[in-house]
Amino acid sequence: MKLASLALAMTIATGALASEYSEWPMAKSKNSIEAQGIYYFGPETSENLACSLAEERAKEAAILGKVGEIVELMEVQSCNNENCDTTRDFANTLTGAIRKIISRKIERIIEQGKSSCIVTIQAEVDEVRNQTVFYIQNDSFQFKNNEDIQFVGVANKKGKVIVFHQSDTVYTKFYETTVNKVGSQFKIPNNGKKIIAKLPEGKDLSKERLMFLFLEVDIPVKQAYTHNEIQKFVENIPVLQRRVVYHSTEIVR
């Protein structure tokens, strides 16, 4: 039996004072919209990952503000004593897509002991109707160390599903499968393969992020991408022939 082991490890953020990166201001288009996203980071979430998640939230806000969106929202709250952290995952039926980011402003702020990354974008948004339905399900997205992981997916079209693990700003492909039956459940992994949750050495908790990419088109996919590379890769796939689902997970001892 072939074993595909996944070490879902996060890079620990280094301490940072308030700093700013800006491509702002730039010329605004009459069809553009300004939107902002924020994400907090700390020992289990790196600064770079927080900024990439903040930008994704800004993009979601731009689409929502310009043309709207149908969103299925799942919130998962984990608590340690009095400290609670809520992660949000979206299964989106987007009615729009980002055509172009005109300008981008990134701020890293430490306030009242909390570190955050704030991303503000000016973007042009096109209205799009994507009829592709793609879901990834599990009873829980919290896993124990060395636990076998299995997801169940459903799609209303034939294609293939590629699963990436995001660690800091690197997306690594660790599983790929084909969807041959429309509307039927399929398992990830299948064919006797395994995905095993692994905690980083010396850690009792690790927050992870998985990206499930459904494709109707057969195109080459690299083993690893940077954050900017994966964005460009996805954006170059026709909107009506792809679907992306993100899931935040936790691995505990």
Image (spheres, grey):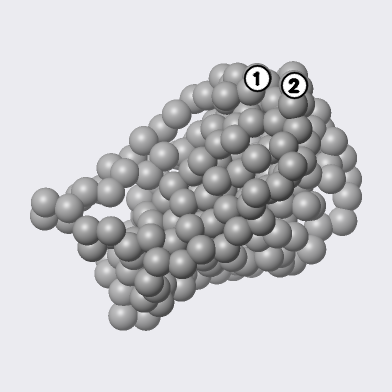
Residue name at image x 57 percent, y 63 percent: 21
Q: Position of residue 117 (x, y in %)?
A: 44, 56
Q: Indicate the quadrant containing the N terminus: top left, top right, bottom left or bottom right.
A: bottom right
Q: Is residue 2 above or below residue 183?
A: below
**Which numbered marker is on residue 67?**
1
Outermost residue toward the bottom in this view: 201
**Which numbered marker is on residue 96?**
none
Q: Position of residue 42 (x, y in %)?
A: 34, 65
The residue under label 2 is 127
Specify which label sits upstream in the sequence, 1 or 2: 1
Q: Residues within 10 Å of mark 1 (few under 14, many from 20)?
A: some
Q: Position of residue 113 (x, y in %)?
A: 23, 63
Near-viewer residue (140 or 58) = 58
Residue name at image x 74 percent, y 21 percent: 127
Question: In the image, what residue type sits under mark 1?
Answer: Val
Residue 136 in sight in this render: no
